[in-house]
């Protein structure tokens, strides 16, 4: 059972964060999308909480927790780029810049949130 939770917890937290960030972002018309402003939403708090929970609930190292949850925003952006690129190949001609912005923003959220996860682990005497 423990092996399943080791894999299941990161997947579930990643997908929940992906959906919570993605839905508001995907609903914005393409003409109004400006990164990073389009990704600012209350759902970023959910990503931060999920990152802290991931580090607290699993035995992941610090960097593993950071890397898993930092990729939520780039995954959301790339899913939109791919979907809209299929429809109109000229719609995201600057997608590498969009991806870099999403990666930087993802790490800006995941790093401090994982520090909070480390603090919570220590507070409740879980192994670090």
Image (cartoon, helix red, strand yellow):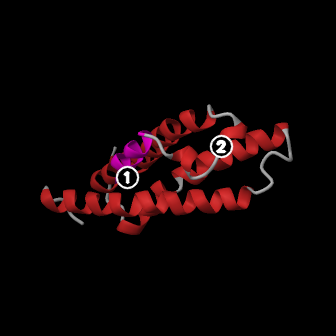
Q: Residue furthest right?
A: 89
Indicate which label's residue lies in the foreground, 2 or 1.
2
In-image side of 73 versus 9 (left or right): right
The residue drawn where x is 56% and y is 38% is 22
In-image side of 71 versus 126 (left or right): right
Mark 2, other Cα within 10 Å: few <14 / some 14–19 / many ≥20: some
Q: Is 28 located above or below residue 91 in the figure?
A: above
Q: Secondary structure at mark 2?
A: loop
CB-based contact (under 8 Å), mark 2 and mark 1: no
Where is mark 1, residue-wise? Answer: 51
Q: Compare residues 16 and 128 and report the one nearer the observer.
A: 16
Q: Is 51 located above or below residue 41 in the figure?
A: below
The residue drawn where x is 13% and y is 59% is 123
Query: Between disc 2 and disc 1, whose residue precedes?
Result: 2
In-image side of 79 versus 108 (left or right): right
Q: Compare residues 121 and 35 and report the one nearer the observer.
A: 35
Quadrant of the image containing the C terminus: bottom left
Quadrant of the image containing the N terminus: top left
In-image side of 68 versus 126 (left or right): right
Q: Compare residues 85 and 94 and report the one nearer the observer.
A: 94
Give x and y (percent) for residue 57: 29, 51
Q: Quadrant of residue 63?
A: bottom left
Give x and y (percent) for residue 9: 39, 45
Residue 65 appears in the rendering: no
Where is mark 2, residue-wise? Answer: 33
- The overriding secondary structure of the stretch rendered in magenta is helix
Report the magenta residues as a range.
42-51
């Amino acid at each position: 059972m423990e092996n399943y939770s080791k894999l299941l917890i990161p997947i579930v937290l990643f997908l929940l964060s992906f959906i919570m960030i993605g839905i508001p972002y995907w609903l914005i018309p393409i003409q109004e999308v400006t990164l990073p402003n389009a990704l600012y939403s209350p759902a970023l708090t959910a990503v931060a909480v999920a990152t802290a929970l991931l580090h607290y609930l699993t035995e992941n190292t610090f960097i593993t927790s950071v890397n898993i949850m930092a990729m939520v925003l780039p995954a959301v952006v790339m899913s939109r780029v791919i979907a809209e690129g299929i429809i109109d190949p000229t719609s995201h001609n600057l997608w590498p810049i969009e991806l870099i912005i999403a990666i930087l923003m993802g790490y800006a959220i995941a790093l401090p949130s994982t520090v909070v996860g480390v603090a919570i682990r220590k507070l409740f005497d879980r192994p670090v």
